[in-house]
Amino acid sequence: MYDWRKLTKIQRNQLLVYRKTQRQPWHSPPHWDFAGEVTFLITAACYEHAHIIGNSSERMTAFESELVSKCQPLATQLYAWCVLPNHYHILLATKGITPLLAELGKMHGRLSFLWNGEDNTRGRKVWYNCHERAMRSDRHFWACLNYVHHNPVHHQYVERWQDWPFSSAAEYLEAIGRERALEIWKEYPVLDFGKKWDVP
């Protein structure tokens, strides 16, 4: 997400020229509109990965609840989600990604104002970006689902999925059972999933 800062001035100019010729947003992945129902992994991060969502467990709980409630009316299915102190992921199917992203944008704006007031940090930039990635196959979907539920373990907050309270992992494990979840984990490994999205 922050590869831009590592680029030289020449590399930045080349990347901007490429994005302009492709009619893509200059500094972020493009937001596509799709016809029909499509499954997406939506990810948003706090600016510079600051632990703003994770200011308190109460804020984390309230944010998880609001995130799910904002997505539910525009999603045909919520498959998985995970809220961490500095970012979140939600895997869902929808027939309207543009209105859903607009709702998330409004939520981000409102919460930025609220949290900056609570933290006495008026003017602080809270969110870095929000982007969606459409699922390309069943394999992509299941790898995404594993990635979302494994995120708190990957970032060393907990040792087991079900120990992280701000995700759908416990529900998922209860619904399909530990043995089936382990089979899916082995069949659809996470590996380097999610890295280098911004490299042309």
Image: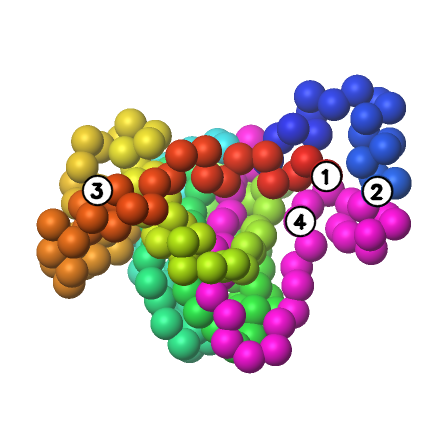
Q: Rounded to the nearest whole Å, what is the CA distance between mark 2 and mark 3? A: 40 Å
User: Which comes sooner in the sequence, label 4 or label 1?
Assistant: 4
Up-down relation of residue 135 to residue 185 (above or below): below
Q: Rounded to the nearest whole Å, what is the CA distance between mark 4 and mark 2? A: 13 Å
User: Which comes sooner in the sequence, label 4 or label 2?
Assistant: 2
Residue to which mark 1 is pinned? 200
Give coordinates of residue 53: x percent, y percent.
40, 42
> Which amino acid lies under the numbered mark 2 shown in the image of this protein?
Tyr
Secondary structure under the numbered disc 2 in the rendered image: helix
Q: Rounded to the nearest whole Å, what is the CA distance between mark 1 and mark 2? A: 8 Å
User: Which comes sooner in the sequence, label 1 or label 2?
Assistant: 2
Q: What stretch is highlighted in magenta?
A: 19-48
| Mark closer to the observer (4, 1) | 1
Q: Residue at x 66, y 59 (%)?
A: 31
> Which amino acid lies under the numbered mark 3 shown in the image of this protein?
Trp
Residue to which mark 4 is pinned? 29
Q: Residue at x 88, y 50 (%)?
A: 21
Q: Is residue 113 visible?
A: no
Give coordinates of residue 131: x percent, y percent.
58, 52
Quarter of the image with the N terminus in it = top right
| Mark closer to the observer (1, 3) | 1
Q: Along the line of sight, which residue is nearer the eye, 118 or 3?
A: 3
Which of the labelled discs sits on residue 18, or is there none? 2
User: Which comes sooner in the sequence, label 2 or label 3?
Assistant: 2
> Which amino acid lies under the numbered mark 1 shown in the image of this protein?
Pro
| Mark closer to the observer (4, 2) | 2
Q: Rounded to the nearest whole Å, what is the CA distance between mark 1 and mark 3? A: 33 Å
